[in-house]
Structure formats: structure tokens, C-alpha cells
Amino acid sequence: MDPGTIVAGILTIAILSFLYGDNPVYKMAETLLVGVSMGYVLVITWTNTLMAVLFKPLFVESEFWLIIPFIFGLFMFGRFHKSTSFLSRYSMAVLIGSGAGVAIPAMLGARTLRQMTATVEMVQGDSFLTIFSGLVVVAGLFSTLSYFYFSREHEGIMGRSARVGTYFLMIFFGTTFGYTVMSRVSTFIGRMDFLLSDFLHLTN
Amino acid sequence: MARLFPQIICGFFGIVLFVLYFLKAPSAKTLYLTITSDYWQIIFAFALLVGVASFIRVNIKKVAKLSEGPYVITGLLGLFAMPVMALLWGIKGDSPFMWVFENVQVPLQATVFALLAFFVASASLRGFKARSVPATILLVSALIALLSRSDIFGWFGNSALEFSEWVRSYPSMSARRGILIGIGLGSVTTSLRVILGIERTWLGKDR
């Protein structure tokens, strides 16, 4: 048998042993996953970001403007000492400030205006079902938004609308839950298929 | 001063990026992409290095403890083995680095995710009780989503599958859109508060 299959099979059983209860074998496999994943991300980040985007362009191609993010990056290490910990705030300031500046137009465009446009467009159509479905979406959207509107008490029309909003939210949570369970179960079936056919050769 | 200057830098970058987003000049576009791509990537990479260094520092302190020692050593071995293998044999398709990725990391990760199926199922058995109208709607819509891909729905023909698709595409999506719009408006407000210096929790506490 392929050594890779043996290793993968043993590790799969080690993780599944958690179903019996928390045990040393599971803990060992879990910490191995943490270590290996971190090592993998470290190598990929070093190769694809630090070498490709920073060190090679800066020191080989002489793109000296990269010294600015390099210094901000080095400031992050300031966190390890009390007297230099304030330096990491400068790096965070660049990330958070630029992130906030990008988020305003991007969020307004993609998350708000585009969603509104798409909702209104759904009402257009030539069949009864299309128009009805579009109206359901409009009603669902307004009632959901009224549920999240806390500047007015949920009484009268507002209260009824908010209650309908909770029904739509429950439909959303229910379907999302259903699809999440399905994806997890399909992953489990994949692991069992690997264990029973590739590793243990019990099935074809 | 230790808090004021970072705040000024934060506001400056926020305003600059906001303005750059709308400018059409090629130089403005280049600067926008440079900051959002190169600057972010580089600082995030260093943040990751800090995280790894912190992980090593915390775990080395635990090595001596008898109860945690073997687990900590396993984690650290995994962490150090990957860069060493990458250094010695590279990270190409048939390298030991990729072998460990495919035969250790991928199966472990997939099985941990698969394990969640049991916990989600047992939690839903305990939690999904039709005690009220919203709880009943939650239960029914989850069942529709779950059964729509199973053979049970096949007995009802295509119409059952179409109905489950309709539920997902219209009533479910309308609530999703409501949440997305809420997130969008919330993000805009928070971003404005950050740029204007009203929101300062990201600065942390003075040590």
C-alpha cells in the first residue's frame, strides 16, 4: 500500500476517535494539524509574498518604495517588548485606515446599492410566478430590515412587519443550516469512502 | 502621542484610499492597487510571522509540563518540519513538503470538518423543536433543504426539487439580502467612525 495512504488513514482514524471521547491520540493528531498548517502557511507566505512581492523587488530590482511597507511590517515585531509595543500601532493604523477607506465605497456599492437594485429588478417579468416571487423578495427584504431597525419600537405596523421579518430570517437560517449539514455530511462520506476503500480495502 | 500619531496615520490612509477609489487617473489607480495589494500583503505577512513567533514562544514554555509536553512537541515538530523540508527539497509537486501537505494536512483538515457533521446533527436534534411559529418555520425550511437532494424528495418528482430551489432563491434570499444590506450599512458607519477617530478600540490599551 502507498505510504501516503497509510499515514492519511491512521490520521483519519485518530481524528475520528474523538467520537468515542477526548483522548491522547486525537489530541496528538489535532496539534499535528495545527503545527503542519502553520508551517505550510508560513512557507507559502514566505515564498509567494515576502520573497516575490517584497525582498526580490526591493533588493534585486531596486524598487525602493517597498521600504515603506517593509518598515511597517517590521514594526509588527515591536509587540514582543513592552517599550516597543507602540510601534505595531503604526502598522495597524495603515491596515485599518486603508481598509476603512476602501470599505466605504465598496460596501455601499456591493452590499447595499447592488442588493437593492437586484431586489427591484426581480419584480419585473412576464409570468405570474416571476412577479409573485419578486414581490416575495421585496416583502422579505423590507420586513427583515424592519426587524433590524431599532430606532423605533416594534409596535403596530412596525411590530407586525418585524414579526414577518423573523419568519423570513428563520427560512434563511433553516436553509443555510440544511446546506451546511449537507456539505459536512458529504465531507464525512468522502472520508469514510477513503477509509473503507483506499485504506482498509473493505469496499470497491 | 503614542495613540495620536497612529490615529492620524489611520485617518490619513482612510481619506486617501476613499478619494483614490473615485479617481480615474492611471497614477491614482496604480497607487490604490499598490496600497491595497502590496502594502496589505506585506504587512499581513509580517503579522503572520509575529503570530508564528508568538506560537513558538508560548509553546516552548509549555514543553517542560508533563501533561502538555508531548502534544506541544508534536505541534512544534509539524511547524518546523514544513520550512525545513521546503528549504531542503523545495515546494514543487513531488517534493516531501507537498507529500506532507497531501497526506497529513489535507486528510486531517477534511476529517475535522467531517467530524462537525455529528455535532451539528446532535445539536439540531436537541435544538430543533417546533415550539413556536418561527421555530417550526426553521425546522421545516431546514428539512426542505436537507431532503431536497435525497431520494425521498425524488418520490414527489421534479416539482418538489423546484419548490426547494424556489425557497432558497426567493424567501431565503430576501432575508439574506436584508442581512447583507445591514452589514453594508454597519461597515460604512464603523469605517467612518474609524477614520474620524471616534472608534479607537483597535489601538488597544496602554501597557
Image: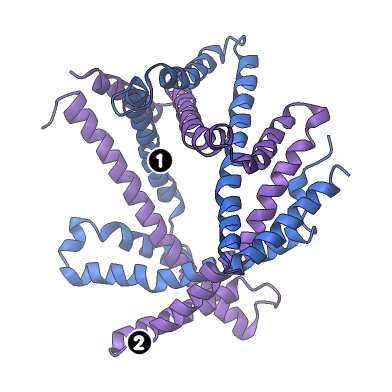
Chain colours: A purple, B blue
Of the 4 image quadrants, the one containing the C terminus of chain A is top left
Q: Position of residue B93 (x, y in %)?
A: 30, 29
Quarter of the figure with residue A50: top right
The amino acid marked with disc number 1 is Leu
Q: Going by the picture, which residue comes out furthest to the left? A: A204
Q: Position of residue A46 (x, y in %)?
A: 51, 31
**Residue B127 appearing in the image:** yes
At 66% across and 48% down in the image, what residue appears? A95
CA distance separating discs 2 and 1: 40 Å
Chain bearing mark 2: A
Q: Nearer the viewer, residue A194 or A163?
A: A194
Q: Position of residue A165 (x, y in %)?
A: 52, 74
Q: Nearer the viewer, residue A4 or A15?
A: A4
Q: Position of residue B83 (x, y in %)?
A: 47, 21
**Residue placed under numbered mark 2 in the picture:** A131
Per the image, label 2 sits on a secondary structure element best described as helix
**Residue placed under numbered mark 1 in the picture:** B116
Per the image, label 1 sits on a secondary structure element best described as helix
Residue density around tag 1, few if under 14, some if 14–19, many if 20 or more, within 10 Å:
some
Of the 4 image quadrants, the one containing the N terminus of chain A is top left
Residue B43 higher or lower than B193, as above or below: above
Label of residue A144 in the image: none
B88 displayed left or right of A153 = left
**Mark 2 or 1, which is nearer the eye?**
2
At 68% across and 33% down in the image, what residue appears? A74
Chain bearing mark 1: B
Residue B73 higher or lower than B125, as above or below: above
